[in-house]
Image (cartoon, rainbow, N blue to C red):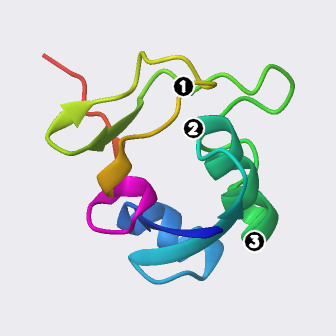
Amino acid sequence: MTAKVRVALPSSLCALAGAPQEVTICLDGPVTQRTLLDALEANYPALRGTIRDYGSKRRRPFVRFFACEMDLSHCSPEETLPLAVVEGREVFMVVGAIAGG
């Protein structure tokens, strides 16, 4: 079964990738942060290195992931995403964190 995952991107990444604010990513197999972000970067190559580090594939420090009213930023990249995200009922949000003082 193919999952159609909705991903919301911040406007800065939309402009960079030439993508709308919400994109749909189709995935076969397990739906994890890693498989979702791999597919997102494959569909929008300009995003490579912006959400995750090029080499390590670790989340960039000022990027956060949210879905189903939960912060998924520190979850394992191999952990299956919530069922509501996998079924397309909830959006997986990529959010740029703000820091300062």
Which amino acid type corresponds to the residue marked 2 in the rendered image? Answer: Gln
Query: Residue 3, can we see it?
Result: yes
Q: Which residue is mark 2?
A: 33
Q: Where's residue 26, x and y in %?
A: 64, 71
Residue 94 located left or right of residue 3 = left
Which amino acid type corresponds to the residue marked 1 in the rendered image? Answer: Glu
Q: CA distance from mark 1 to mark 3?
A: 22 Å
Q: Which residue is mark 3?
A: 43
Q: CA distance from mark 2 to mark 1?
A: 7 Å
Residue placed furthest toward the front: 1
Query: Looking at the image, how many numbered discs can be counted on the residues?
Result: 3
SS at circle 1: loop
Residue found 45% across the figure and 39% down from its top = 81
Q: Report the magenta residues as a range.
A: 85-94
Q: Which mark is residue 79?
A: 1
For marks 1 and 3 on the same chain, the one whose residue lies earlier in the sequence: 3
SS at circle 3: helix
| Mark toward the viewer: 2 or 1 | 1
Of residues 98 and 71, the one nearer the viewer is 71
Q: CA distance from mark 2 to mark 3?
A: 15 Å
Which amino acid type corresponds to the residue marked 3 in the rendered image? Answer: Asn
Residue found 65% across the figure and 48% down from its top = 37
Q: Which mark is residue 70?
A: none
Of residues 36 and 49, the one nearer the viewer is 36
Q: Where's residue 13, x and y in %?
A: 51, 62
Q: Are marks 2 and 1 in contact (CB under 8 Å)?
A: yes
Q: Report which quarter residue 18 is drawn in.
A: bottom right
